[in-house]
Image (tube, rainbow, N blue to C red):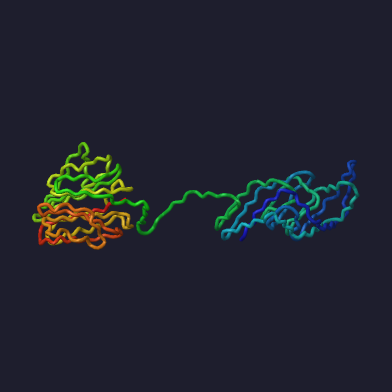
Amino acid sequence: MAVTGWFAELICDVEPATITITGSTPNVVSTTDVHIFPEPAMLTVIGERPGVNGPPVSPLAAQLTITGGTPSLRETIAPAGAGVTVTGSTPEIVQTANHLLQPTAGTVTVTGGTPTIITGKILQPTGATATVTGGTPRIIQTIAPTAGAVTITGGRPLINVTYPPPTAQLTITGGRPLIHTTVVPTAATITVTGGTPIVTNNTLISFVSANSSTTGSVTIPTHSIGDLIVLCAFDSQNTAPIKPSAGGTVPNWNYIDNTNTSAGQGALTTAWFIATATNTTSGTWTWAEQMIAAVVTGPVGTTPIGGHAAVGGAGANVTAPAVTMTHTDGSSILMHFHSTAFINGGGWSSAPAGYTHRVVAGPASSRSLLLNTKDTTTSDGAVTQPDGSSGWAFAAATVEVIN
C-alpha cells in the first residue's frame, strides 16, 4: 500500500452537484428577516468523489453518517480524531509537488415530501436527517450543523470547511513509513552470535631496537614514556635468573616466565615493564650470564603480553616453543629467544625462513643468546634456530606482545 502525503490550507471550490428534492409540501413561514423554515426533508447524497480545485488533497474513501438535531448556520465542526491503521510493507511516500487532485463530482439525491419554496435571500430548513454514502460530497454553500453525534468510518472526509483536526492515533504495522519527518530511533542492543569477533586495530605496535650484554645487566635502548621494555636473562645452568629489587631508575619488573629447568639444561627468565621515564635501567639480575633488552612502541595494552612459554633442553639445535596467540590478525609482535651453553665457531646460523635476527649476545665463554622476531604474526608454531653445537644445554622462550 502506498501512502501519499498531503497538506491543505485553503477551502476548495468544486463543480456543483445535482440536488433533487422530493417529498410532501412543507410548511414555509416567512419572517421579517427573510428567513424561510420548510418542513424537514430527507437529504441523501450519493455518487463518487467530487472534483477539487486547490492545493494537494488526497482524502481516503469513507462512509460518513451524520445524525443529530436541527443544524444551524455559521458553526464549525471539529470531529474527534479517527483511528488510522496502516498495514502492509513499508509504504512509499509520494511527493505530489502541489499537483491538483480533482475527484469526480457525486450525485446528490434528496428524498422526502415536496417542499414549497418561497423566494428569498436565505433558506434555512429545519432539522433534517442527512445520510451521505459513497465518495466525499462537496456542497456549494457552507453548512455548519449544530454539534451532533458524528460517526466516521474509514478515512477522514473533507466537508468544505477549514478546521484543525485533533491529533489522531497512528498505528503502523509493517515497515517504517517516511512521513516527512526526521525519525531518530532509540538505541538498539547489539548481540553478536557465533565465535569471538576479532577487532583489528589499524594503529599497530612496532619493534624499535634491542641491546645485548654478556653480564647480569643490560643497557635499555632509547625509549619514551609509554614504550614497552622486554628483558630476557640467560643462565647456562638450570636456574632461572632473578630480578633485582626496584629502586631509583630500576623498575619493578613483571615476570613473564621464570621457571627453573632440569639438570643439564639451560634456563631463561623473561620480564616486561611499561616505561614511566626515559632513563629506565635493568638493574643487576642474579644468575644472569647474558641479557637482551628490546623496546616496542605503539598502543600496547595495560597487560601487553599475550601467549608466552619458556623451555630448557640439551641438543644441537635450539627450538623455541609454540604458544596460543591472543591476537591472530597480524597486529602482534612475536619474540623468540634462543640460548646455548656452547656455540660453535661459526656462530648462529641464518634466521629460519619468515624470521628476522634482531640482536645477539656473545659469544662469551662459548655461551650466546639470540633474539629473532617473526615476520608475519597471524599464526605461531615451534621454531628451531640451528647453533651447530652437539648436545649442549640450551634454553628458549617465546613472547607475544599485543596492542
Pick whichever, 188 or 340, lies toward us.
340
Q: Which percent across, then down, holds residue 374?
A: 26, 58
51 lies left or right of 94: right
Pick whichever, 249 or 159, lies toward us.
249
121 lies left or right of 379: right
- Give the total of numbered labels: 0
Pick whichever, 380 or 188, lies toward us.
380
Farthest residue in the front direction?
346
Q: Which percent across, then down, holds residue 118?
A: 91, 49
Residue 382 visible in the picture:
no
| Rendered residue at 32%/55% (across/down) | 331
| Rendered residue at 23%/56% (across/down) | 357
Farthest residue in the bottom direction?
353
**Which quarter of the rendered picture does the N terminus lie within?**
bottom right
Q: Which percent across, then down, holds residue 327?
A: 31, 55
Farthest residue in the left direction?
263
182 lies left or right of 70: left
Q: Which percent across, then down, holds residue 183?
A: 55, 50
| Rendered residue at 71%/54% (across/down) | 64
388 lies left or right of 222: left
Residue 107 visible in the picture:
yes
Residue 217 sits in quarter = top left
| Rendered residue at 44%/51% (across/down) | 189
